[in-house]
Image: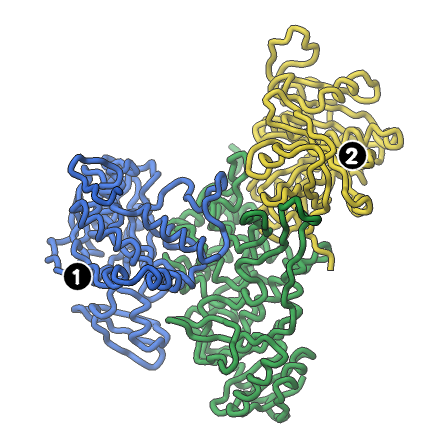
Amino acid sequence: MSDYTQKIRETAKKLLSEGKVDAVIGYREGTLPLMAEPCLVKDPEKVDQLVFNSFCGVNLANYLPKRKDRVAVVAKGCDSRNIALHIVENQVDRERLFVIGAPCTRMVDRRKVAAAVGGREISGVSEQDGKLTVSGPGYEQTVDKKDVLQDNCSICIHRNPVLADEMLGEKLPEQEADRYADVREVEAMSPEERFAHFKDLFSECIRCYACRNACPLCYCPTCFVDESKPQWVGKSIDPTDTMTFHFLRAFHCAGRCTDCGACERACPVGIKVRQLTRKLEKDCLGLFDWEAGMNPDVRPPLDTWRPEDPEEFIK
Amino acid sequence: MENPYFPYPVRIDSAVIETEDRNLKTFKLVFVNPEDEKKFAYRPGQFAELSVTGKGEIPIGIASSPTEPGFLMFTVNKVGVVSTALHNMQEGDIMGVRGPLGNWYPWEILEQGKNVVIIGGGFAFTTLRSSIVYMLDPKNREKFGDIHVIYGARSPGMLLYRDELMEWEKRDDIHMHITVDGTDDPDWKYNVGFVPTITEQKAPKADADTYAIVCGPPVMIKFTQPVLDKLGYAHDHIIMSLENRMKCGIGMCGRCNIGMEYVCKDGPVFTLEQLNRTPREY
Amino acid sequence: MRFLKIAKDDWTRGVEDLKKSFRVFGPVKEKEAYDFRLLDKGVLPDFSFQNTRLSPKSTVYPQSEILFEYTLDESKADHHVHKVPEKDYSPRVILGIRPCDAKAFELVRLNFDTPEYKDPYWLSAYEATTKVGLACDDPCSTCFCTSAGSGPYDEAGLDVLLADRDDHFLAKVLTEKGEAFVSAAGWNTEAPDAEAGFEKLAAEAEGKVPGGVPTDKLADKETVALHGADFWEDVAFSCINCGTCTYLCPTCWCFDIQDEVKGAEGVRMRNWDSCMFPLFTLHGSGHNPRATKVDRVRQRFMHKLKYFVDRYGRGIQCVGCGRCVSSCPVNIDIRRVARLMNEFEPAPEKCPA
């Protein structure tokens, strides 16, 4: 059992039995190897289902808006940045929230693990010292965790929570990373190449909206794709409608996306949705020296105006 | 293979604003191909999908009666894309009708000399009008016992089919109990009060030969049901017509179910006894 | 019913011959995953898959399908008249469909082919389709077909069942459609003694399918009590209400109907829809009978595991393919929910004080 798991249970039990919170939002063991399921615990006697491991990729900030009760939530670096954004955007009340901060040990992409074992069935997995031992019918294989991280985790530069009421461990060292190598490649394309690239990127989209629904930023009561008066986007899998959905959603996340990777993690057909959001992240960094969710008191650049904002792009 | 999605083309014969808030309009529709009318044989309580080409379809209860040949009548509340487009259409315009859909009030039982108490509120009076016209038809009236109608709206100007209501008031083979929530009209000579209250005052006591048909907004139904319980109506003698979001109207698209029943195909008419056995997802 | 042996080198030729009289769909690997696609000339189905990422339901029931075309141009005589566009219902074959997915078509048929109404689009495509199954000797850990009334060698809905035997296929020809298929492919090497082998393979394969998803008591449950069970909130908590489970499911059939107009030309089309989406049941008035996530998650499981059972008496609306289990972004697991539902006992009624 990881140290975090033990501490989460202790904290949850304490908070619940002392009546400090009504519920704790964390993860429990998944029914599948390499998965953990978000769960809500209200009963101090039931905190032992809570776990923390390398498969806790779901962003729990997604479960916070519109809650009326007092909750504690386990938050990795990215989750905590989304909580900060929720606070700025008045989606959660800081007073009613207890943040259990988890300096993040980086999350594993189960598809990469599956590929690493050649697509063989995986029936069990254990982790130790940066290694995953994967087993299945007739085999056991050890893979380096760093080789199977979620794409966003492998380039993450903010693994430590930006806000917390209690920390599960000491802050971990941050890494230097080139976050935009693939974005630059797309930027370098001609408009025609780029359009073809995006058309291919979204060609397999089935409009299930898992990317949107997994995203903590997408809390609009009615998403623009669901509006009927007027209807902005068609409902079929017409490529133009599908791309319109993805492009507009990305723009709606500009300056707000923390690159938590929830969208890509949720996509059932493996679309690299983060190419769009990271382009906008790169632009916000360049134009406004801005990283989303680092401070719960500062509004994102696209919903404020400051005299020093760049305006060269206005023609 | 018959295509159950194909709308019969119809022409708008008349479109009349029905209520003072101008949100309800009554359309009389005439089949473009007269042979389609024969295929569209319906019974009071059924509904149809009104099709506006380029906009979509909406499920609407049939307000005309099969005893009124030559046209179909629908009263449409302006709420969404299709109903708004429909409100903007003119006499003579071509649109579509698909149906008849769903089941009907249990005429097989009611026509055996049963007493019928119709309880309606607001703009849910459409299939109730159909039923009243059907029962009052000279060929049909003798098949029924006493007929009571309790019908309420927010104000006199919000009552549907006012001219007909007044004519029915004058007849002695139907007991009309029209009511409004409130009015400042000094000449209003009917009831004032909510439908449940008037039901309590005017509805006949329950017996094995008396059936209540209840159709109205959720709040009216919620408060009328205890009144009927108090009056002793058995739940299999309380008949209700449900509305749920529908698309196909033929039990295939999956959205309108309450439990294992599809409101569009197995309903919209259910007895309260049936509804007691399903989740209240309506 | 008869048995044939198809040598692998004859397979390639046969598949190409088939393409002269059938549109041939088969699994192919694109980017990272297998899906069913129309196979062009020279392209063979790739049978090195466990199961495809998306179910093959779209070969009969496309995600987006035009029901009618029309013009709004009043200068044209037939303006506003709905016309069914020309559709290709020429013979098509799905090569290598897994038995669970084939069985799914039989369950979905109960929805689209009813005594009162026939869906001409679904039914015409279904009738045009020959389903050639590929028996499943290597089930996934998320499979539970044998618990769901199917199995790795289940013949329900199939015209031919193939068993892959290294250098050849054994084919069990089950229907007249199956006969037409093998004759179009020119496969005619009889293998009369294959029957016992098939049975042995089936038993072996069935033994490999993880079991233990009980559904035997679902029919006896009282609907309203099960609907009110206290586990739904916990089951639904993690759900993000995306459409992954329903869109990947071979037995989910729900759809939406939409008009789309470009200029003066329009179509009435249908698109897959999902009971997970709030819009699915939203009334024009703003009222929503399934307004919360708990309502919607419960609807999905109640439909599959209770309403369907009661309505048709044909078992659950699930074939145990495991796609929703393995692809759910938050690990909601129908196997767990089935267990909860099957074991549910309503709390004893309190005595009136």
Residue shown at the point (45%, 79%) measured from the top left: C138
Rendered image: mark on residue A178: 1
Rounded to the nearest angstrom, the CA distance separating label 2 from label 1 is: 73 Å
Residue kind at label 1, given as amino acid type: Asp
Residue at mark 2: B65
Q: Quadrant of residue A297?
A: top left
Chain whose colour in the figure is yellow = B
Chain whose colour in the figure is blue = A
Q: Position of residue C107 (x, y in %)?
A: 60, 63
Sort mark 1 into few (<14), some (14-19) or many (20+) by Cα contacts within 10 Å: few
Residue sitting nearer the eye, C252 or A42: C252
Q: Is residue C342 above or below residue C284?
A: below
Sort mark 2 into few (<14), some (14-19) or many (20+) by Cα contacts within 10 Å: many
Residue shown at the point (22%, 70%) measured from the top left: A147
Is the Cβ of the residue at disc 2 closer than 8 Å to that at disc 1? no
Q: Quadrant of residue C323?
A: bottom left
Residue C201 located left or right of residue A208: right
- Colour of chain C as rendered: green
Residue sitting nearer the eye, A223 or B172: A223
Q: Chain of mark 2?
A: B
| Quadrant including the C terminus of chain B | top right
Residue sitting nearer the eye, B177 or A179: A179
Q: Position of residue A304 (x, y in %)?
A: 23, 36
Residue kind at label 2, given as amino acid type: Ser
Which residue of the protein is positioned furthest toward the top in this rendering? B186
Is residue A103 visible to us here? Answer: yes
Count all numbered tags in the image, as a single digit.
2
Q: Position of residue A215 (x, y in %)?
A: 33, 50
Rendered image: mark on residue A203: none
Q: Position of residue C234 (x, y in %)?
A: 40, 49
Residue sitting nearer the eye, A156 or C89: C89
| Quadrant including the N terminus of chain B | bottom right
